[in-house]
Amino acid sequence: MINQLVKSIKDKDAPIVVGLDPKLDYLPEGLLADAIASRGETLDAAAEAIWQFNKGIIDATYDLIPAVKPQVAMYEQFGIPGMEAFKRTCDYCKSKGLVIVGDVKRGDIGSTSEAYAVGHLGQVKVGSRTFHPFTEDFVTVNPYLGSDGVKPFIKICKEEKKGLFILVKTSNPSSGEFQDREVDGKPVYELVAEKVAEWGQSHMGDTYSYVGAVVGATYPEMGAALRKVMPRNYILVPGYGAQGGQGKDLAAFFNEDGLGAIVNSSRGIICAYKQAAYKDKFGPANYADASRQAVIDMREDLKQAFVR
Amino acid sequence: MINQLVKSIKDKDAPIVVGLDPKLDYLPEGLLADAIASRGETLDAAAEAIWQFNKGIIDATYDLIPAVKPQVAMYEQFGIPGMEAFKRTCDYCKSKGLVIVGDVKRGDIGSTSEAYAVGHLGQVKVGSRTFHPFTEDFVTVNPYLGSDGVKPFIKICKEEKKGLFILVKTSNPSSGEFQDREVDGKPVYELVAEKVAEWGQSHMGDTYSYVGAVVGATYPEMGAALRKVMPRNYILVPGYGAQGGQGKDLAAFFNEDGLGAIVNSSRGIICAYKQAAYKDKFGPANYADASRQAVIDMREDLKQAFVR
């Protein structure tokens, strides 16, 4: 799957992953009203509206992008119908040839991490039949519990040829509270990065490992250091756009081969129609076209990362 | 809810939380076969069998215990039907007066943590109606992202009078890889504990905070140190029984008032019928009675923690 991700990034010339993180107030008026008209004021209506919103964006952008990253919390908050919308979104993205990064940030003791891995990346057996309960290609994993919490994911990834992005340095303002604390002169995030490099060696693709890392666009100088610690691990870079990162600041996340990083934008793409740059040209009815234009503009902006 | 938890622990004289972490191979023969007979070899059958298994244990133990801790991964691995079984289990436990600790170990950047908090502890609005998508009273939270990732949970907890247990020192063998690394002479877990004490002050119950901590039974000497760092935060103690902890080793987790800690047992209770101590007296058909006896025995064993 890492080989497929790398190939798709090259083919589409776009190291971009679109964060499908819908909230009800992101939706253009009408989508929720239509769902409520047919299903009442229910969780089911909310989930249907979110799914329709996602479908519009996927249809308008899938030919331009290699991957999507649905944030499961945004679906989980609508309970069972929300989780159905999550699965439906993943399945639809798969049918469009997109690589799916489930942003689930799971991680637990060994047997429990294995259950998460089975559910999101693997297969579960019931009697003589097997099922893929959820259908992501990669998931994000929290490293706080150490190797016990990560290795069961890697085991399932090996069986399924799937991958991980492990939280190293997150994009949020308070990420430094624990991640930046220095242990023998090295920040904790660097200790985690060293482990990611080690874990990654056990599950290599053609040029990059199936085990990647999350490093926020908001900390480019740390990205530069971490690029060197994890030369063969893909870096998933959140925090571009709405959280503050810009293409010209992202050079350090990439390797000399022009690869090694994939940049996430969520609100910047899915809410493009509400932003100054797009709202006059694209109204709410054309929200998906605004998302397409935002992807094209992001692709151009990211080229600034390669002006050396 | 922390006040209710403390009262129920006192009333039942049992600082016990039963981990409802079912796997299919934990179930007595017959439960899955019955579900498959009516639903086929489906995820739905697996989820139904798990729910029936849980219901048996809940019915046999609810009068003895204050709380349950369903581990969501064990449900999530069966996809949507699994999540339905999770919700059904939580709702049923609530109807029996039990406090529910959702062992979800979520944690993300601010807006995402808020979505998790809304989904598991709070309410979500659709049109003019509100819903409680999942119905836990407490959830476990991973602190790796720092305050940004925790405070949205506390905000929702304040609105709902609900609570958290934040991972401080986990019970698994590799927990020390990052948690034990020393920063200015203090291990990372102690820095997290100091934050838990600080966060907890913002949401106090009568005698204890709504914000608690997770510290593994497998590390009693660290429990003693952390008890002092977090005097008014409840400690959820996993790792008793199957993972190796024993009652006599747990004294340090409790305060002088005999409170301040609640000890989790999962396999030790829900799989009691498979264990040497119970399997001759209770066969698979009486698995729930074996679980009841295991709770009674655990209650006695925990009294060793108070022999000072």
Image (tube, coloured by chain):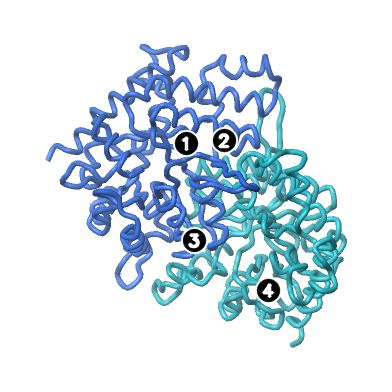
Chain colours: A blue, B cyan
**Circle 1 sits on which residue?**
A70
Mark 4 chain: B
Badges 4 and 2: C-beta atoms under 8 Å apart? no
**Dot 1: chain letter:** A
Q: Residue at x 82, y 66 (%)?
A: B283
Asked which secondary structure carries label 1, the reply is: loop
| Marks 3 and 1, the one that precedes in the sequence | 1
Q: From mark 2 to mark 1, how far is it between C-alphas?
A: 9 Å
Report the Cα–Cα distance between label 1 and label 4. Answer: 38 Å
Which label belongs to residue B241?
4
Q: Tell me where residue A279 sits by quadrant.
A: top left
What secondary structure is marked by label 2? helix
Mark 2 to mark 3 CA distance (whole Å): 24 Å
Label 4 sits on a secondary structure element that is helix
Please give left or right for residue A282 compared with residue A47 in the image: left
Disc number for residue A75: 2
- Circle 2 chain: A
- Say which label, 2 or 1, has the lower sequence index: 1
* Closer to viewer: mark 1 or mark 4: 4
The residue positioned farthest toward the front in the image shown: A128
Task: Confirm or deny contact between disc 2 and disc 1 (CB under 8 A).
Answer: yes
The mark lying in front, picked from 4 and 2, is 4
**Residues packed near mark 4 inside 10 Å, few (<14), some (14 to 19) or many (20 plus):** some
Tag shown at residue A149: 3
Residue B31 coordinates in the image, percent (x, y): 77, 52
Gap between marks 4 and 2 measured at Cα:
36 Å
